[in-house]
Image: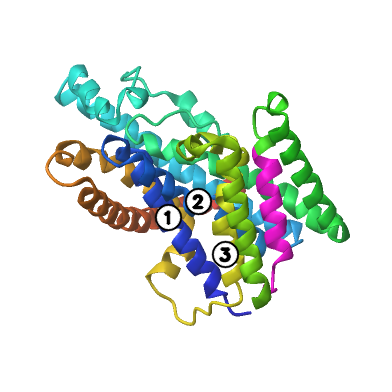
Amino acid sequence: MNRDLYIDFAKGLATLSIIFIHTAFWSGQFYILPEVRVFSLVFDVALFYALSGITSGSNIEKTLYRLLKLQITYMIFVTLLFFLDYFFKIFGLTFFSLEWLQSFYSTFGSKYSATSISTAPQWQNLGNWYLHEYSNADTFPVVMGSFWYLKVYFILTVFGVLILRFFPKHVNWFIGICIALTLIFNIFPEIYPSGQVGYVAFYMTIFLVGNRMRGKTIPTKMIPVLYGLVAAALVWMFWYFGDDVFFKINKKKFPPQTAYIIWTFFSLTTLFVLYNRLKITKENFVTHIGKNAIFFYFGQGISSSLVYFLVVPMKESMPWWVLMVLIYVINVILAFIIATGLKKFDALGWKVLEFLRKKTAQ
């Protein structure tokens, strides 16, 4: 079966959007207007869950094998990250000083400054990362700030494939249950559960709707109706919550609350409207990013941390929008270079694991 390049294209655009979001909300906190930072969330992480739903099936063995490969790739990456962070601290303490390191980390702002710098490796952090407890990586703070998505993805995919495998005729019921839970949590915010429940209730809806859309095309006559409903939802949101809710969209994202949920409607509608309608016939730069989305997702965490050291000295020397465009382009280039390196390092890691497997199997 031929690969659907639209899926790769959509993943690529979503990844480029994530890079822009992290450009705006991390180093961009120093110079980008709040309005622009909020608008960067128009095409956000919800797209990945919808695309995952479209590409997921009911084959449990295949799905778990894919998740196992992703977990090992993730563990290879965070192991590299752990030692990069540790060796940088050793380098700073050996050739410079503790004060130099503290000054270096202060570039990220007080919220992300390192609080404990030691020559002893913090092995518990690596173990926690393996188990998806994302304590901060001091040298690359954006990396762990991005990884909440991965934990929810694992949970969604496991429960999603179980629903598709054992309850194929009741998928709509599960969509209804997830919508009902999301509504209850938002109508009665005092009972909104902590942890992953709120995330899964909303994003499972998107995942299952994406799966129901698999192979289908939204009728042309329904397109203006859908966008009309999106517009009506946005108007209601501003009427009910007030104009200042616009600046609270990002805070309403963790966990997903009404304002952020409505904010995602436009991008999700656009994704489904273009699905099976926009034909991508040739591979290109965007589809390449989509095919290697996980490495770009890893890489952008590093690159979005590095661009801090360009933003801080340059923010007073040019208009904010020029700097934003420049930093975004640099961030994309760095992410591309880092993602290419990470893909090769991942291949090396798998070769080492295969070598160890053969040696221990004897």
Q: Which residue is mark 1?
A: 17
Amino acid under disc 3? Leu
**Split into 4 quadrants, where in the image is the N terminus?**
bottom right
Q: Reply yes or no: does residue 207 show up in magenta.
A: yes
Residue 220 on image: x %, y %:
64, 77
In depth, the one of 302 and 196 nearer the eye is: 196
Residue 155 visible in the current orientation = yes
Q: Which residue is mark 2?
A: 44
Question: What label sits on residue 271 in the rendered view?
Answer: 3
Q: Looking at the image, do the residues carrying marks 1 and 3 touch, with CB atoms under 8 Å apart?
A: no
Residue 347 visible in the current orientation = no
In depth, the one of 306 and 277 nearer the eye is: 277
> Does residue 320 appear to the left or right of 180 in the view shown?
left
Q: CA distance from mark 2 to mark 1?
A: 7 Å
Q: Looking at the image, do the residues carrying marks 2 and 1 touch, with CB atoms under 8 Å apart?
A: yes
Amino acid under disc 2? Asp
Q: Is residue 301 above or below residue 166?
A: above
Amino acid under disc 1? Ser
In depth, the one of 185 and 310 nearer the eye is: 185
